[in-house]
Image (cartoon, rainbow, N blue to C red):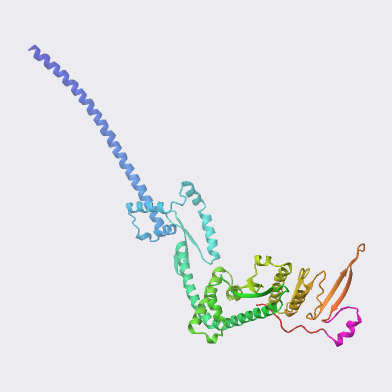
Amino acid sequence: MHEAISKLDADLIELDKKQETQSKATIEENRKLAVAESSLTQAGEDLQRIDAERGSAVSALHALGKVRLLGVAHDDFRDADALDWTTKGAVNIAQRIDSLLKQVASGDEDWKRNQDAILTHIEDLKRTLLQCEFTAEPTATEDGIFIVNVPFQGQTCTMVELREALASDITTRHTLLAAREREVIEKYLLEEAASELHVRLREGEAWVRKANEELIARPMGTGMTLRFDWQPRDDGPSGLVAARKQLLRLSSVWSPAERNALGDFLHEQINLVRQTNVSRGWQKNLEEALDYRRWHRFTIMQKRDGEWKRLTKRTHGTGSGGEKAVALTLPQFAAAAAHYRSVPHAPRLILLDEAFVGVDSDMRRKCMDLLTIFDLDLVMTSEREWGCYPTVPALAIYQLARRDGIDAVGITRWIWNGKVPVTVDSPVVKASAPDAPPPAPTELQFDAV
């Protein structure tokens, strides 16, 4: 009996220990449960806060879409109303923005700097638009967004929409202008301008032909001869060769297809010049577009040993001193005569320093003859050349002389009357002037192309 009671007491003590352990475990579990409940409450509050922030961010992003600013940032967001503005959709939109506009600085400092300068940017934009006669309308939305719209053709446009509207308007105007230009080309250019170009091209070719006749008639003693070559530029406008060939013919023999082709050529020249000089007036652009001189290139050809070759630095360097001088001098005479034709009443004056150095007497005579043919007036200095040749109608000559030890220069004036040189004070001049007047210059004259 005593043993049974002792066993029961031991069991009771063990049960008390277990009860105490269970009580502690219960207390611990209750503590953990309280912590979990607190964490759950905090998580719920955090979730509500995050949902609110996300909703606010979606609303702010949607606000940018509603005022069409996303479309200003990138064309993919032009139609903001068609985008998915649910929470998931807004997240996808934000990710696309981050990907498409990753090159744009978007840090906090960049945002603050742009926000601080937004009013200055708006004022600059207003001034710029005002110069183009557009009125900017800056406003601030309830979301604190600054937007600038511009009224255009009865609509309120963002900057991107204004740019596209202007581009469309310009395209329309260009279409109308092209049609009008075509009408003008058909009505005026193919008649009046083409007729004038026909005359000018014919005159140019005639000038080159006559100049070449004179140059070829005056070869050097070595046999070296010069002539000009006036051809369309290799880098000239597309279709130039065919257009030039047609312009050299009378317009009365043009076929309808040829008229259309020439009209296209002239229209293209006008467009090219206008695109290059947008701000320049119509008249100046038209003058440049129809300037046939820009379509051509002069080349000097040199004949040696019976073969014509283009005069270049290399071929020029192979000649003698006299040939080099003549190869440069004669084309300059022709160029001066050609230039003076563009101003009919201009003095036809050229200056020659140490004229015809290294050129033999016969070629000097030919050069002076050519100056008379080209109807050029000259002032020249030379150690030995007086220019007294039968082909020269008149010259005033000043001979300068000096002696060592005398600080003076003696001047003797001579007059070449086409036959003999006489001093100004010589009675021969007074006696022969009425009876033998200097011969008149030749009637063959050369002018500019």
Above or below for 44 versus 84: above
Left or right: 182, with 226 as reference point: left
Where is the N terminus found, in terms of image quarters?
Answer: top left
Q: Where's residue 180, x and y in %?
A: 50, 78
Count up the numbered dots: 0
Write down the region rendered in magenta.
Answer: 419-437
Where is the C terminus found, in terms of image quarters?
Answer: bottom right
Quadrant of residue 22 in the image? top left
Q: Where's residue 371, x and y in %?
A: 74, 77
Quadrant of residue 227 in the image? bottom right
Q: Where's residue 430, x and y in %?
A: 89, 83
* Residue at the far right in the pictured view: 405
* Residue at the far front in the pictured view: 305
| Residue nearest the viewer, comparing 355 with 241 | 355
| Residue nearest the viewer, comparing 12 with 191 | 191
Left or right: 197, with 327 as reference point: left
Residue under the point 21% across and 23% down: 20
Indicate yes or no whether the magenta region holds residue 429. yes
Left or right: 331, with 396 as reference point: left
Indicate yes or no whether the magenta region holds residue 258. no
* Residue at the far left in the pictured view: 1
Regarding residue 264, the answer to whether it shows in the image is yes
Q: Where's residue 294, x and y in %?
A: 60, 73
Residue under the point 71% across and 81% down: 445
Quadrant of residue 188 in the image? bottom right
Above or below for 118 versus 418: above
